[in-house]
Image (spheres, coloured by chain):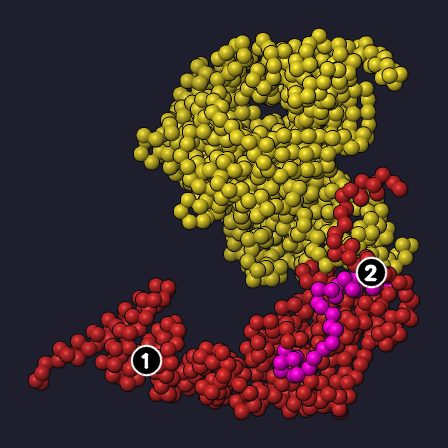
Chain colours: A yellow, B red
Amino acid sequence: MRAMAVGLQRAAALEQALDRLAPGLPVDRADTPDSHVTAVRRLPAVAAQYAPFPGALDARLVGALGSRGVSELYTHQADAIEHALGRRNVVIITPTASGKTLCYNAPVLNAILQDPASRALYLFPTKALAQDQLAELQSLCETIDAASGEPIGVFTYDGDTPQDARRTIRSRAHIVLSNPDMVHSGILPHHPRWAKLFENLKFVVIDELHAYRGVFGSHLCNVLRRLQRICRHYGSNPAFVCSSATIANPRELAERLTEQPFELVEKSGAPRGEKFFVFVNPPIVNKQLGIRRSYLGETRRIASEFLKRNLQLIVFAQSRLTTEILTTYLKDDFEDVPGGPERIRGYRGGYLPLRRREIEKGLREGAVRAVVSTNALELGIDIGALDVSVMAGYPGTIAATWQRAGRAGRRAGRSAAVMVASSAPLDQFVVRNPSYFFDASPERALIDPDNLHILVDHIKCAAFELPFTAAESFGRHDVQEILSLLAEQGLVHLSGDAGDENARWMWTNESYPADAVSLRSVSSDNFVVVDTTHDSRVIGETDFTSGPATLHPKAIYIVEGQLFQVERFDFEGRKAYVREVSCDYYTDAITYTRVTSLDTFAQEGVASHGEVHVVSRVVGFKKIKFYTNENVGSGELDLPEQQMHTTSYCLTIPETVMGLLPYAADDRRDGVVGLSYAMRQVAQLLLMCDRHDIGISIDSDDTSENPAPSVTKARIFVYDNYPGGIGFSAPLFRMHHELLDATRKLIAECPCESGCPGCVGPIGNTGPLAKIAALRILDLLLAPAFDSVQATALEAAKTA
Amino acid sequence: MSSLADRLRGIIKPNRADVVERAAPAVDATAGDLETLLDGRWYGHCFIVERRLPASKKYGRDTVGDLAGRLNASASDAPLVCGTDAARPPFVFFDLETTGLSGGAGTQAFLVGCAWFEDDGSLTTRQYLLARYSDERAMLAAVAEDLGRAGAIVSFNGKSFDAPLLETRYLFHRIDWTPSQRPHIDVLHPARRFWKEDDCSLVVLEQQVLGAWRDGDVSGYEIPARYFQFVRSGDARPLVEVFEHNRLDLVSLAGLTARLLEIVRGGPDYAENAREALALGHLYARARADGRAVEAFERAVTLAATSRSRRASFLTTDALRALALAYRRARRFDEAARCWTALIESGCPSAVEREAMEALAIHHEHRRRDLESARLFAERNLDVSGRQPRESLRVAARQRLARIERKLSAVDSRPLLP
């Protein structure tokens, strides 16, 4: 009775808050791109669809599930279990809270009950997710043991597992819960000690499949190549069961990652409560400059409305910095409420595990009323069912947006998701075209497991684990040729003649190659943040690539709204020493990037695709005032460069085109800068990738220090932001015409007069003619006659 | 040259160690080279180098025959060192040379050295070389046979390094690792206690304990590179010194084991100094040979008193404390109390002083039933405990004193007249 009353109260509170945001709810309405609330969609409640247990399922398992209240299955669970029982690889698309774990636990436990020698390996993208699953699975196993006397060992095995427990786990675990990193560096290189597991491996479960895209996915594919190679050595052939959030190509991703055929189960039978999805565009405050009210302020206002009505919510921010800023804002709003600020928490990567566990628990138990998080809480960490999810800025991809919206919602009862658009072009495009989001298919997850940097690293690891034969293949490239080159460096040696079937590539090096390879990034390096205010204690960490930009000297480092200033940045020692400060600004690093072309793979007209060298360096920082976002100062920095080779799309704006622009050199340059700003956003949309997956750089011969009188060509690079490239630049090159068309549309249709953050960038960044010059460049490049213009130009260049 | 190769060259960066190694001249060699250089023979797929040191041969201060004799005479006390009753002759000494220190499937034992004493007092060393990758299985099978007939296998740091590494190789080939069933004496741990705590390497020990010196020994970190050089070129010259290094390690291991068992067998009189006597006492105590432990500790106390070692005072403290505990275990309480008293008088570190005060308080409270003295020690115990970081110790000290005082006041409150 009481629960029901609470439920009704909550529904009423939610209705009130939504009504304040968009009066007249709840009803479906047409989209209104120009108003404050551009779209409201009602996703109706869906009733459950059930199916009986497959007949082949072990009676002891069915009994144990029954005693835990599971007397029938949702249809998608039954389908998935049928496939797995038939030893067909299966990938399941699962909305949040649809009972995905049973899809893999049932066939795995069934196999163990039928043959206690059977083993299974579960992979989760993070240690925390594995811990989260452990308790549930162990308790199911205890029920089975109590009823049928079949003890089933379930253990996590990761970097936190104590050394003395490892031997026991190796011999006693039927199910090992681990992560790709541990399999890569802790299990595969020691496979002889795991012989029992590899000989009897029946299932490999990959949870949160969609997390494995880009670099991480490309690494995982290679880890799975190694895993399957070891399984063949021990004579086993495990089936794969994968679960994924909604992406466009789950089956393709599963098949690319495992290099095996897959069945797809995509229709959920789980019930779902009613949900409202609202798009908010902060109103324009200066039409001329195209400036909108701050999206962070708007997010803060909306979140406070929900909080005031005692609804529990999660706020997603785009970066670690905005997470901290929003946490500070919300705590300020509830400063006068006793205990208010303490119940509003921040959450992001870089917090120490204990603090994270405490916040997760607080959310589940209701003590924490609001959490402001980066994408760290997007994956399936159990934080219970919340009432509202508010997104500060468009998360960048359709899949991520649904995933974040799904963190609010109960099986029964009403929930809401609100997306507040920032002034970035991509956000503006989505918020003004809601059907792009609601009706389009989500993104494709791309990986490039044959990126040579990644592939070579894993070939070293594979050679250490099991010598290659002279006939073996591994990936798309010729592994024998790669091994020959590794032999030149003394890492391997062919023992026997190449034609001999007993010939093997021996590992002839003292090193342990897996130690030098991190699956998450370019290097396994990180920086730790040491607070020296009282005594020395570590309060956080940052990965190597973003270290200089966030921990440079004088940077403001924020942890849950508490401000620290970096006093000393020890680049060599990988440490930043900080001290608590009280100030009213934060810092934003200025990074200088230079790209040089190394090699061209393909060229078509003004577009090309090739290999580039990228050098980036943090050269300074801006001080930005909280709330007003005023620039209140700056500083110069002298930090080491970071370098990489990667692949890039390149647009060349020929001299002829530049020469046809009726503007001064500075204005022409502004046009190129503005064009690149807009192109970057459109490229991200077309590639459906994350903001940090690509980088942009302009290479123009006339620099501002030395304005050349003559007209020169300019080049815009859109590069893969990972060493070796990760498969974005080639598709972008193929979409070259779409890219230019859509960029033109974005700029031309923007209501501002001469440039704004929604098209070519804010006026302060570019000159007054940026917008018109950018449009002019695009018109010239897109003109049907351009090919001949270009041809003439090339001729002229040759004769000159 | 293909473009793949070009791109790979940019990615696969040479590492410095390999450059150094490749700078050495590589000479193509025939199989005969291996046999003549190392003076070994092929047995099927196994390349074996076997040597015999005659009993009359001098090794350090003693002859090989002497070492064999001592080992023979003391063999029955091996269980005291090993911890399992099953340890018995024949002893097979073993030592590996490996392709790396990190372990894992890609680390191999390329040289397995085994040694044992013959009945005539000579020492046989047998070294197996992994000459070709495809021979590993055959090599492991042959090694298992040698080690399998051992009554105990003896190593230096083998429990943490050599045995697990070898076990991984057997698991890799899915052959039973029978030597894991054999009793294993790891000489490193007793050697630390008997002879040297810091830099307890074989080379240091053989000089100090056996009086043996090596010339031009190859250093450990060079060994994997020398093997890789042989693998790539077929030139066995870099291996000659590796084989000699491994062989000397085996001989020294045999010598140290003989000396160790001699002391264990002979008892306190065979101990040359306080340190050996003390280590011996601990060894007996762990093996529950309480009577022998007491004798060894008594000898340690005596030797420490006359020791000119700069560690003499530490040795005195350790020996007295060990002796006190040994007496107590043997229920020789008054002698134990005398040791604790001597400890306090010797000006020992405060942690030991606290322990001594506590032991004396207990002794006077429960054994002697002398509550006044008990209170005195309990007070001093509390006093010293105040300097200890552990809270539980201070609590225990307070409680003891309070209890003794309660007992004392109970004594006082009896009516004067019945």
Query: Crowding near pointer 1: few (<14 within 10 Å), some, many (20+)?
Result: many
Q: Quadrant of the N terminus of chain A?
A: top left
Q: Where, by quadrant of the figure, is residue B395 drawn?
A: bottom left
Against A543, is B140 above or below? below
Q: Nearer the viewer, residue A669 or A717?
A: A669
Q: Secondary structure at mark 2?
A: loop
Image x and y of residue A715, in percent:
73, 22
Q: Secondary structure at mark 1?
A: helix
Q: Nearer the viewer, residue B6 or A451?
A: B6
Res B24 label: 2
Q: Chain of mark 1?
A: B
Residue identifier under label 1: B360
Give the mark, 2 or 1, whose residue is nearer the N terminus: 2
Q: Marks 1 and 2: in contact by CB < 8 Å?
A: no
Query: Crowding near pointer 2: few (<14 within 10 Å), some, many (20+)?
Result: few
Residue A262 visible (yes or no): no
Res A344 label: none
Q: Which residues are magenta?
A: B205-234
Identity, as a three-letter code, of the amino acid under mark 2? Ala
Q: CA distance from mark 2 to mark 1?
A: 69 Å
Q: Residue at x 73, y 15 (%)?
A: A709
Let me know if residue B227 is in the magenta part.
yes
